[in-house]
Amino acid sequence: MAGNTFGKIFKITTFGESHGTGIGVVIDGCPAGIELNLAYIQHQLNRRKPGQSKIVTQRKEADEFEILSGVFEGKTTGTPLTLFIANTNHKSKDYDHIKDKLRPSHADFTYRQKYVNRDYRGGGRASARETAARVAAGAIAQQILEQKGIVITAYVSQVGPLEIQQPKEELDFSLIEATPVRCPDISRAKEMEAYIKQIKKEGDTTGGVVSCVIQGCPVGLGEPIFDRLHAELGKAMLSINACKGFQYGSGFDGVCMRGSEHNDIFINDNGTIKTTSNYSGGIQGGISNGMDIYFRTAFKPVATIMRPQPSVDVNGNSVTVTGKGRHDPCVVPRAVPIVESMAALVLIDYYLLARTDHF
Amino acid sequence: MAGNTFGKIFKITTFGESHGTGIGVVIDGCPAGIELNLAYIQHQLNRRKPGQSKIVTQRKEADEFEILSGVFEGKTTGTPLTLFIANTNHKSKDYDHIKDKLRPSHADFTYRQKYVNRDYRGGGRASARETAARVAAGAIAQQILEQKGIVITAYVSQVGPLEIQQPKEELDFSLIEATPVRCPDISRAKEMEAYIKQIKKEGDTTGGVVSCVIQGCPVGLGEPIFDRLHAELGKAMLSINACKGFQYGSGFDGVCMRGSEHNDIFINDNGTIKTTSNYSGGIQGGISNGMDIYFRTAFKPVATIMRPQPSVDVNGNSVTVTGKGRHDPCVVPRAVPIVESMAALVLIDYYLLARTDHF
Amino acid sequence: MAGNTFGKIFKITTFGESHGTGIGVVIDGCPAGIELNLAYIQHQLNRRKPGQSKIVTQRKEADEFEILSGVFEGKTTGTPLTLFIANTNHKSKDYDHIKDKLRPSHADFTYRQKYVNRDYRGGGRASARETAARVAAGAIAQQILEQKGIVITAYVSQVGPLEIQQPKEELDFSLIEATPVRCPDISRAKEMEAYIKQIKKEGDTTGGVVSCVIQGCPVGLGEPIFDRLHAELGKAMLSINACKGFQYGSGFDGVCMRGSEHNDIFINDNGTIKTTSNYSGGIQGGISNGMDIYFRTAFKPVATIMRPQPSVDVNGNSVTVTGKGRHDPCVVPRAVPIVESMAALVLIDYYLLARTDHF
Amino acid sequence: MAGNTFGKIFKITTFGESHGTGIGVVIDGCPAGIELNLAYIQHQLNRRKPGQSKIVTQRKEADEFEILSGVFEGKTTGTPLTLFIANTNHKSKDYDHIKDKLRPSHADFTYRQKYVNRDYRGGGRASARETAARVAAGAIAQQILEQKGIVITAYVSQVGPLEIQQPKEELDFSLIEATPVRCPDISRAKEMEAYIKQIKKEGDTTGGVVSCVIQGCPVGLGEPIFDRLHAELGKAMLSINACKGFQYGSGFDGVCMRGSEHNDIFINDNGTIKTTSNYSGGIQGGISNGMDIYFRTAFKPVATIMRPQPSVDVNGNSVTVTGKGRHDPCVVPRAVPIVESMAALVLIDYYLLARTDHF
């Protein structure tokens, strides 16, 4: 398996398992001379970490990171920047009972078949705990991008059947953190929260949607033909645990529209060429056009439920699987900083790549 | 722009523009000793080519390919395999009038900003004509995969508001070619065809959805964490012109489901471990699980419409753009072989990569 | 075999065989807006092409290139730039007699074992004819680099036992083309030429050394740790047919020196930091230091000799191999533009990469 | 700087600096199910580590590694395998006096110019300490390769002007560790040792040559055109600190030979095709031919000498630099396991790649 690296210029390689010594990330290609805002990194990790509210898993992890390399006198040196987060609260015992059992809709079966020697504790490498490493790296990318005015904001726009009701143009992003759900439509957020609590009480789980807006992106990012900006964003999002779909701009809704409705009309806005609508989602021909980039990502219901389910073990014998341990009833509130991080990793990579467009 | 290569082991690099000498593809990493079925390559090219029916663009291109390298005595040699398709029917004159105009929802503006020196004729490199090169390469991947029993089938499942009505389990794939729409639900296909004709008559265009099923995929393909099988499939699809979204398995519908409904239960089916449902879409933890792989891709309405639209030129002056030339009212019938091809390119790549899982 | 691509940003992929339709190259990542000097490309191809003088192979190839994509109105568009050189004078009949014979010190045996289906005509893909594609691409890189004052000059510094006698600091590069040997030490060049003619008359071949100097390289090119500038130059040179060794700066001679002799002392030369000697060969820690980059490459004697040699065929039966066709008695005069081209491809790639050092 | 990854399938990424928390390596793509021989990893690290004998630097580092990820129940899991070696004996104070001084023939100047923010302590990232991470990874590659009978052996063949005297065919590799010099020609080794001690006493340093033989390599490894086996080996060696040259087979000596002498004649040795001589160095056309692979690497004299040298500081002011701290008078004895490790990393990568030659 050599799929643990992401990016072309600003490249990250993550490592570690849910119940090993910890998880980490090597960033190769981070520009030199960047003064790191360590508090922001921790802030983003805290938004992802378990135990932060009643509606997420109660595993307690400090998720404090240490820097193993690449920083000198507070600034990046252009050499590999390594961050490590020790595992402190793993309860591997919780997993002994499922050592040989194949949990439904988990990666147990496929990892077992592919690698044979599988770390079953807490999902091993397949655990979403790995995403903490991405968030640490993404937080660095975000703070660099913000120097150029590129701001990435994700939020929960759907939990189970409950969709956000305010139009996205009217949302107040300062309210995202106002509720543990991370939906800026507060009244809807409260309903979502109640829904998640109810689902949890029933020992069940639900899915959700995370939306993301990128503001301030300059024109010209994206590398056609295969490495279109939205194609890389799509891959980035689909690489997040439990993500089942990606759409940008009009997405699947655009299918029903006519060209005459869907086309974004160009205008000259005081010397800047803009479009009057933005069904293109800020990307045309795979290249950013200067408008807001907008996309949505679907997350399936968490596979671990607190109810007995029939299954088989690795030998094909019938068994019953019942969730133990501490798990999320709905993954989207914690997915918000992960989506932001993966978007930031794509954006910074393409920002640097675009410097080579001309000689 | 160095984004014209796709794949890790079985790597394709495409080149060429809509109105240049032609378009082509170099396949590097094609296994040696493969006897090429040239007729199948042409068959797939014919399914993509313009002018094949009343509901697609009337540009006439033979789309006949020639092999420039990599084949000896009818078989691949393991060296770069190059296919070239000459452009014969380009009418560059059709584009003189829009030389400096920015067509709404086309790549004119972004290419102009990014590269400055832009071949405006027929969309240049941004034209969907480039996908013929992918289909040629994909047809080779498909014929190799079929030797291992892996069969990839795409079809149209929605045109504008008209969704396919038969459940996907009941579809008869032998009917896909029975109508020019390439929807195997024949009665619905006829409605779709009528809808496209009506839209065309109105000088307008519509979007659609292409669905794809991969049968016979072995367990174990996919390279977590970032190069999950569905993440690469997603990127591959999103790299196709006009594609706005990708979802696999339950996709966006899965968001509303509960874990207890959505989990696919493992059973022992005469020694083979299978699942009773397939909301996972044949992929768990980013790795194929042996069930059918299933995904859907959204295509927006074609941007070129036969009606006047306001826009600006490259200098920001107000202009009117009216579509000339020969264009598709709906892209999905021709997108079917493109979706199959990109899926085949991903599958063959991951098939070869999986050989390195163990020593 | 997926090793036909070179470079990270300015990436070339070559294709084609000695006796196929032709050979070509796709350049992906060539900056947009470059006005191509087609005459210079042809000039470099002419320096490499067969039949140019009495001391090289008499195969007659025009080696005229055509541009298949990536240029619009004389300038690059940032999209894949493809050049193709048709084969016109291949005499495949010359190779029928060795179809199954393994020519000593050729790639016949290894290609046969690795790929089984081998194009034996003229060495197929293993032929040095492939290097014409590199020269075409390299000539483009060279003309771009020269805009920034980076000048790459290669010359023959040894033929068989005859080493160049003038110190490299005293060489007059304008004399390189004064003799067919391409050694700027004219009196030595004449001896080399006579030596090659003598060797040829005896039906034998000889080796040689090509030296290369890169002037005007800015400080800061090179990507430690693994992608040091000299490591990539070394790989580039060693990828040329018949190249057996690479050394830069003091190279193997430096082994015998002491640190106190070998260290290059830094001085302040009117505000520019330079070194008084240059045993480092212009590269320190894998990064260019602004001094001339200097390296040497060893080429073995050509394997095809006009004398009978014992060998075996693919089945292990004893056979006799006698060179037919038209071959070089010594490869280094024609290797000069190839060395320059590969150096230019490395330099332009690292020049573009260095743009991402800081944000 | 994104050049800290090496390999295509078995990929390593190293991180860390001389005087930071430590150095480490992530191996992505290590096959699953490999039982690690931890003692062998430590054995190779011990051969590289400082303080092991009188003729190397007296810095005392335990160079004990810990495994941070990728191993479960003693075997690899196919997920990223991370090893970390803490720095324990760094004396950063030794470097305060040269904080702004440019040490001759070090990377101080180039890193300063390229990255500006430079960790000057002990050379920072440019320190050869980084090679410990390579040795840890290489030791794993070596133990895997040995399962297939591929054995890699490096030894010192020259120190300053003292070349090994026994022909390489007569060397007894079991004697390599018999002396601290790691030259299996014992009487010559003793002279080399005395020479190094003398040089050290004079406060000076010397260069040397490390030779390497790879036995048991199967036919067919190597990826023409650019990724020829010897080109990748050359790059691997040239990426080692202080390496100035690489030659394989006949190398630079082959330049003076005639084709009739140099050609390796094929014979049928009881059903196996071999060559009677091996000037090709086990590689033809960039692909291994089953004979021993043989190459030599040149190392320059260590730049840090215990004598005052004139130089400038970062502002161009004249200064005097005098080596302090603990340094090697000659690097080649400690380079032996590094050369083996880099060779092993190339071989395992190409071994795995060759599995994709046929479908």
Image (spheres, coloured by chain):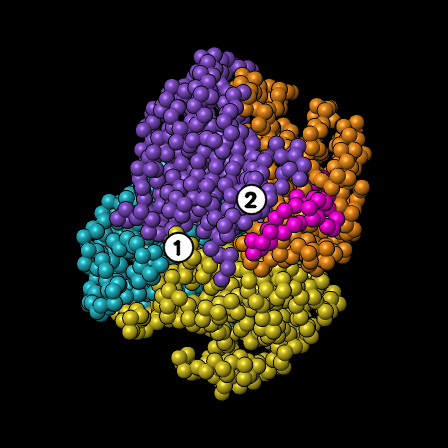
Chain colours: A yellow, B cyan, C purple, D orange
Most common secondary structure along the magenta stretch: loop
Q: Nearer the viewer, residue A243 or C292?
A: C292
User: Compared with residue D146, is residue D268 higher up or lower down, i.e. above or below?
Assistant: above
The answer to whether residue D300 shows anywhere in this view is yes
Position of B207 with respect to A173 (left or right) is left
Mark 2 residue element: strand
Which chain hosts label 1? A
Residue hosting label 1: A357
Residue C346, numbered circle: none
Estimate the x, y position of residue A247 in percent, counting from the top left.
43, 67
The answer to whether residue A114 shows anywhere in this view is no
For the residue marked with disc 1, what is the amino acid? Asp
Q: Which residues are magenta?
A: D303-331
Classify mark 2: residues with Cα within 10 Å, few (<14), some (14-19) or many (20+). many
For the residue marked with disc 2, what is the amino acid? Thr
Residue hosting label 2: C275
**Residue at 61 percent of width and 32 percent of height:** C253
Residue farthest bottom in this picture:
A187
